[in-house]
Image: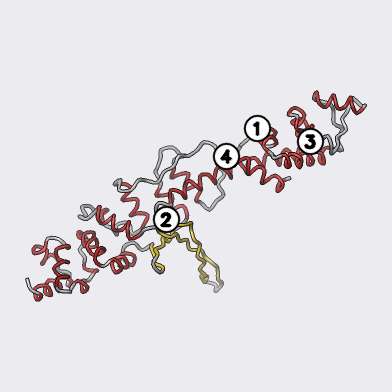
Amino acid sequence: MSKVAAERALEQFNDNNWEEIEPYFHTFENFYKFLAKYGLDEQLNFYNIPDDYENQYLGVMINSKPELTLQYIIDNLVTDVEKRGNDYYLRLRDREELSELFKQNSRWEGARSVAKAVLGEDWWEPYDSTTDDVYRDVYDELTPENKRYLSQAVFEEISQQKIEPETEMLESLAEEQGHPEYVELTTDNIKSLMDDEETGKYLLRLADNVKSEMYSIHHGAFNNAYSDEIYDEVWSELGIFFEGRIDETPRVIKNADGTEKTKYDLYIKLKDFPGVISKFLSEFPENNYPSDSLGYSGTYIGILQAMMDETVYDWLDFRVPDYPDYRKTTQYINDALRDYI
């Protein structure tokens, strides 16, 4: 075949007549190589690709003209991806969209459901009741300095009350003080009294305000430790396909009445957009089904899901713990104490 034949074939293709030349080449790869031989490959019209050959054609083009091909893809097929400099970013509908890449589970506590909850805009507190013993779960977990601080808060709340000697330790102290019918609390003895479990629990029953705040402290620390642990797991998995976290880009829009408001568009940097696209095209070169087409879903998440469905990639997954890390809960309790009390 001559250059004249190549030019004629190119003209046929660009006039949307691939069926006329297909019998001579059979594949787009052969056709492209023929055009490239005569320097005519850059004159190919992307928009005349027959749907049944889209992946095959793009697979050839992404290896020979990667920048041009990727730009065509984000302009026409995967329109939620934008290029900034040399990097590619995914534009999200909302944060929860990323949870669609996690493994679905029949149990609510599966990775996808939990990822959706922790990525959501609403504050996630999965546990309503976190303790039935704030002495054991809060006071016992405090640092020595915080124990002294909380003991003084108890003293300030109940020091004006008549403290009956309801425990063995209080009975002994009342005898020492010379009035066995009541105990006189002081800033010097309150810490040692609180350190005795039986006595400390009794004093907390009298200090309603402090005890109530201790329940709040534990509830917040327990839920925060749990959600932070899940959040870290979620982002560790997302790190396979993305870099960094979600970027909120402000955009001012005008209302019908002429007023303005700021809307925030959500973006996240893609780790290897060209690599993922190339892998998709190599895995589904024949377009056997409509869903095999690169542009079928029109979204980057949809492309990843399609490959996960076919085990090209594994679904993102992690073990959902029953409880938060004990050490983190303890840390959060100590960090929050003086904000509450």
10 Å crowding of disc 1: few (<14), some (14-19), many (20+): few
Q: Quadrant of residue 302?
A: bottom left
Q: Name the secondary structure under disc 2.
A: strand
Q: Amino acid at mark 2?
A: Phe
Labels 3 and 2 touching (C-beta < 8 A): no
Measure the C-alpha gap from mark 2 to mark 4: 30 Å
First along the sequence among labels 4 and 3: 4
Q: Quadrant of residue 150?
A: top right
Q: Which residue is mark 1?
A: 132
Asked whether, in this view, residue 119 is left or right of residue 166, the answer is: left
Q: Position of residue 216 (x, y in %)?
A: 67, 42
Please name whichever residue, 304 or 186, is drawn nearer the observer in this view of the structure.
Answer: 186
Measure the C-alpha gap from mark 4 to mark 3: 31 Å
Q: Which residue is mark 2?
A: 242
- Residue at image position (26%, 63%) is 62
10 Å crowding of disc 4: few (<14), some (14-19), many (20+): few
Labels 4 and 1 touching (C-beta < 8 A): no
Of badges 4 and 3, nearer the viewer stands 3
Asked whether, in this view, residue 101 is left or right of residue 28, the answer is: right
In the rendering, which numbered label is found on residue 191?
Answer: 3
In the rendering, which numbered label is found on residue 127?
Answer: 4
Asked whether, in this view, residue 11 is left or right of residue 246, the answer is: left
First along the sequence among labels 2 and 4: 4
